[in-house]
Image (cartoon, grey):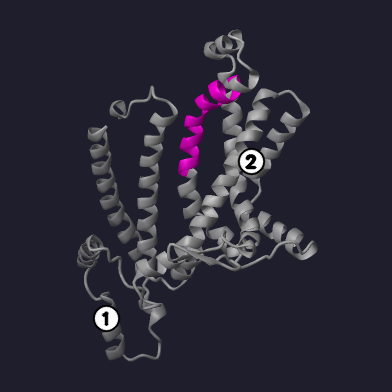
Amino acid sequence: MLTWLLRRLFQALFVVLAMTVIVFIGVHVIGNPVDILISPEADQAERARIIADLGLDQPLWRQYLVFLGDALHGNLGRSFVFNEPALKLIAGRMPATLELAVTAVLLSIVIGVPLGLYAGLKPDGFLGRTIMAGSILGFSLPTFWVGLMLIMVFAVQLGWLPSTGRGQTAELFGLQWSFLTWDGLRHMAMPALNLSLFNISLVLRLTRAGVRETLPMDFVKFARAKGLSPARVIFVHVLKNIMIPVVTVVGLELGSTIAFAVVTESVFAWPGMGKLIIDSINVLDRPVIVAYLMLIVLLFITINLLVDILYTVLDPRVRLEGKR
């Protein structure tokens, strides 16, 4: 276990280092922030002074080494626009995105697993067919269109839910959270549901496929032959064996949900990291863009590591030492 963990940490370090090069070069070729940040009316001396203050007068390789050295000390740069540490700006928006993404993933599990289990147990029934047909909509409908329809129905027509903003928040561990207040939960309901639709369909279909594949297996037949109750056969023998692929997909989708919540946050004016990165891209605020992308890389690496560890919890036959 320790050998495997050290190997994975070394691989993660190499991936992070490679991503710093890719992200740094990619961000620096998409445009010149000087053209946006400096007024066209500024003279050459003022222009040269601002460029030097931002560190943009140095060659790209030197800028990268400075960035790498600062990153080792926990400094991912200073925003050109806000004149604040990029990490501080992102950390201030992170709770809003995290609670929205985690809620969306929990909804996908709570809704997708039971529906997929029912569709797998009764695939030829009317409700089972309806569930599978409805899951296609989750894959097909654009997120922004679904968000606008939710606002139109539940906010404009029915007036049940607020359409924008985060609502009232409460403090926990020094951070502000919406899920701790009733008003915050009402504001979070539509964006979380909108963000979870794709994941619900994915988990549903994955669960259904796993159930259909597991039911004919010998250990399930043997469990039934021993006289175990149908509920025990399903929840202990069937569901437990199909959870490994579900956990894998849900873990990866958590990272994807956090990284790609931009559209939902824009539609519902949710003040999270997605809106910050869109604003930063519009003004080519390089430090914020690089810091955001690096945090997303670290997030995916951490989630992959946790998913691998969960394998042994769900199925002891999986040995981490034997993974390659």
Q: Magenta span: helix, strand or loop, mainly?
A: helix
Task: Determine whether 3 is above or below 282 in the image.
Answer: above
- Quick one: quadrant of the C terminus? top left
How far apart are labels 2 and 1 at the CA level?
52 Å
The residue where tag 2 is placed is: 111
Residue 83 included in the magenta stretch of the image: no
Q: Residue type at mark 2?
A: Ile
Query: For mark 1, does the 10 Å Cα neighbourhood hold few (<14), some (14 to 19), or many (20 or more) residues?
Result: few
Q: Quadrant of residue 44?
A: bottom left
* Residue located at (74% from left, 34% from top): 130
Residue 67 at x, y percent in the picture: 25, 65
- Mark 2, secondary structure of its residue: helix
Residue placed most toward the observer, 63 or 227: 227
- Quick one: quadrant of the N terminus? top left
Residue 87 at x, y percent in the picture: 35, 66
Residue 242 included in the magenta stretch of the image: yes
Task: Determine whether 72 is above or below 83 in the image.
Answer: above
Query: For mark 2, does the 10 Å Cα neighbourhood hold few (<14), some (14 to 19), or many (20 or more) residues?
Result: some
Task: Determine whether 98 is above or below 5 in the image.
Answer: below
Magenta stretch in the rendered image: 233-252
Answer with left or right where residue 211 lies relative to residue 7. right
Q: How many marks?
A: 2
* Residue located at (22% from left, 33% from top): 3
The residue where tag 1 is placed is: 53
- Mark 1, secondary structure of its residue: helix
Label 2 vs 1, first from the N-terminus = 1
Residue 4 at x, y percent in the picture: 26, 34
Residue 33 at x, y percent in the picture: 37, 74
